[in-house]
Amino acid sequence: MSIWESETFYRKRDIAIIGSGFSGLWAAISIKEKFPKKSVLILERNSVPTGASTRNAGFACFGSLTEILADSEKMGWKKTQNLVKMRLGGLKKIRKYFKPDEIDFSLCGGYEIINNNEPLSRIEEVNFKLKHITGIEKTFSLNQGKLEKFGFGNSKFLVENPLEGSLHSGKLVMKLLEKCHRLNVEFLFGAEVENVSENDENVEILLSNGNSVASEKVIFCTNAFSKKFLKNEEIIPARGQVLLTEPVDNLKLNGTFHYDEGFYYFRNLGNKILLGGARNQDFKTEETTELKTTQRIQNHLETFLKTVILPNQNVKIEQRWSGIMAMGSEKMPIVKPLSDRQFCAVRLSGMGVALAPKIGEILAEML
């Protein structure tokens, strides 16, 4: 390391954030807004944020009916309500910071395909539980008329949610990067962290290139990739595979769609269909941080496409990819101090778009 490098790129900072996805970027923004004079450095091992933030389906959602019901049964209504409130607050913050055309945001409405009566019998209960959070009487409502409109001839019920939308995840990340630069947040891309050690004076961050940088405090925002550093936390990687069709003539879909407690999700991207999920068909294999697609899941997605979304239509696939989420035994994210100098914001359970803006605020308060 030259003296020029040691006094600039690798000099000591007040706060270092590991990971430049949604949680890392929003954390940096919240910290600089609260503490403008503090120096903040974000370290990212890749040339662009790679994990879930730039590889998801571009949903601006806070949970479908069946997903919220499943969460309430697993962790109780109080935690579920707090989680929905955090997600909805995060989505509102995104719209406050960025104009719709900057991130291709559309309040298109969200829908869930349901093929049994049990969840429908609990719509009023869920709406009552969420009324003070969403501010509307009917967060979810049955809309059978749109089953035919969207071409879901093989499905029984369609539940609508007027508060959900879609956005362009890549453009959102770029706008967050621009915001960070305006706030004088600094970056080291291509900087893979090998080890983090703490002493009485600072935190030492050792990089894979042999160099190191010190900071007063460090925040881990590496989501599913955090197990390397946070060995005592329950962090289960979950690969989400996605496919994108070629343009579909006379496509009827417009909105964001869910199926089976959120394990399937799809939307229109112009006149194309973006479809992801199905990891519940092979949970064990999909508990990985390996960014690739598998024939088993991709075949299942194609079958779902041709039987549920576009019955009896032949559609060609234009693109396939995967992103890595982080799950646990419950949906609450892990946002907490690990010591006086180390903090973490991980395990966003596939809801990083909505959760990260509020998680950034929580981290700023912790500091």
Image: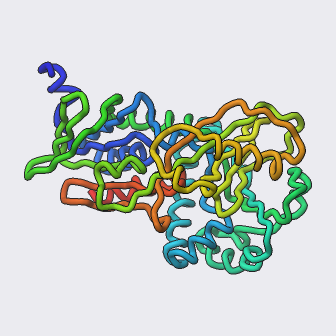
**Residue 96 location (% of width, % of height):** 55, 49
Colour scheme of the picture: rainbow
Tell me: 103 left or right of 194.
Answer: right
Residue 109 position, x and y percent, is: 73, 54
Identify the image quadrant of the C terminus: bottom left
Q: Quick check: can you spot residue 168?
A: yes
- What percent of the width, then of the height, locates residue 76? 52, 78
| Viewer-closest of 201 and 66 | 66
Residue at figure coordinates x 83%, y 65% from the top left: 157
> Camera-side residue: 131 or 74?
74
Q: Is residue 129 left or right of residue 80?
A: right
| Residue depicted at x 10% and y 50% | 199
Q: Position of residue 258 (x, y in %)?
A: 70, 57
Q: Quadrant of residue 281?
A: bottom right
Q: What residue sits 67% from the left and 42% below the top?
A: 298
- Can I make out residue 357 in this image? no
